[in-house]
Amino acid sequence: MPTETLHIMVVDDDRMSQRMISKRLERLGHGVTTADNGQEALDAMQSGHCDILITDWMMPGVSGPDLVRRIREADGPAYTYVIMVSALETEQDAAAGLGAGADDYLRKPWSGMELEARVRTGERIVRLDRQLRAKNAELQQTIEQLTRAEKTIETLEGFLPVCSICKAVRDDEGDWHPLENYIERETHAQFSHGLCPKCMAERYPEVEAGT
């Protein structure tokens, strides 16, 4: 059983082939949807991502190769691993399917073990793509944090517009903030409040005298 459920779409104008492939993949624990032709598959992918696409070659309207080309041209937010299934047997046919953008080519009649092996290969690629995208997102977040920190340092090293009466600080947008709030927001530092000896003597002389 896979550690993480993947969404697989089976595209075939032959309902029997759809059911055979779907049942086999559902036993592996994946979520499987079907489409009767390439256009139906494209419409479905407009509203939801597909991790692995298994498509027949010969279909009315949008064929398998055309479907794959349009998926690759769309360049979605995550990678879709494509397995092309066809009764065409020559090396030229396989090369044409892969040239259209498919990742793998499965000849009919296929065996269940071969289908599962091809899908497991797709699983590994999809998960590696997810990990890479997650790492890239973390890296981008780190870069943004460093950029903000650099801007904060530049601001704090330069001149700060401070009100001479209430000591509020004006930010780059022209808004005024209490000094503590500004520093906490820009540096992520937190204040711990107390009283210095001078203020203690002025505000609480009885306490100072008692000491």
Image (cartoon, rainbow, N blue to C red):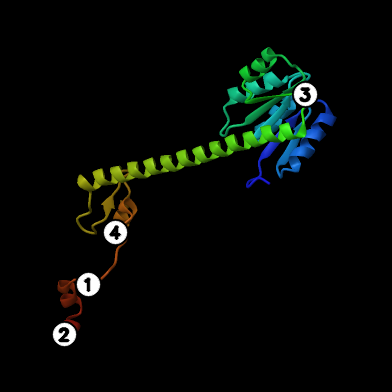
Q: Position of residue 194 (x, y in %)?
A: 25, 71
Asked if the residue under mark 1 is in contact with the one under mark 2, i.e. CB atoms within 8 Å, the reply is no
**Amino acid type assigned to the residue bearing label 3 in the image:** Lys
* 92 w.r.t. 108: above or below: above
Q: Which mark is residue 211?
A: 2
Instruction: Assign a secondary structure to mark 2.
Output: loop
Q: Which mark is residue 180?
A: 4
Q: Can residue 177 be seen in this snapshot?
A: no
Q: Earlier in the sequence, mark 3 or mark 2?
A: 3
Asked if the residue under mark 4 is in contact with the one under mark 3, i.e. CB atoms within 8 Å, the reply is no
Say whether residue 166 is left or right of residue 107: left
Residue 197, picture quadrant: bottom left
Q: Earlier in the sequence, mark 2 or mark 1?
A: 1
Q: What residue appears at the point 27 percent right and 57 percent down from the top-left corner?
A: 179
| Cα–Cα span, label 2 and label 1 | 15 Å
Residue at numbered disc 1: 195
Label 3: how many Cα within 10 Å (few below 14, some 14–19, many 20+) = few
Q: What residue appears at the point 44 percent right and 43 percent down from the top-left corner?
A: 138
Residue 91, picture quadrant: top right
**Amino acid type assigned to the residue bearing label 2 in the image:** Thr
- Figure label count: 4
| Cα–Cα span, label 1 and label 3 | 83 Å
Q: Which mark is residue 108?
A: 3
Asked if the residue under mark 3 is in contact with the one under mark 1, i.e. CB atoms within 8 Å, the reply is no
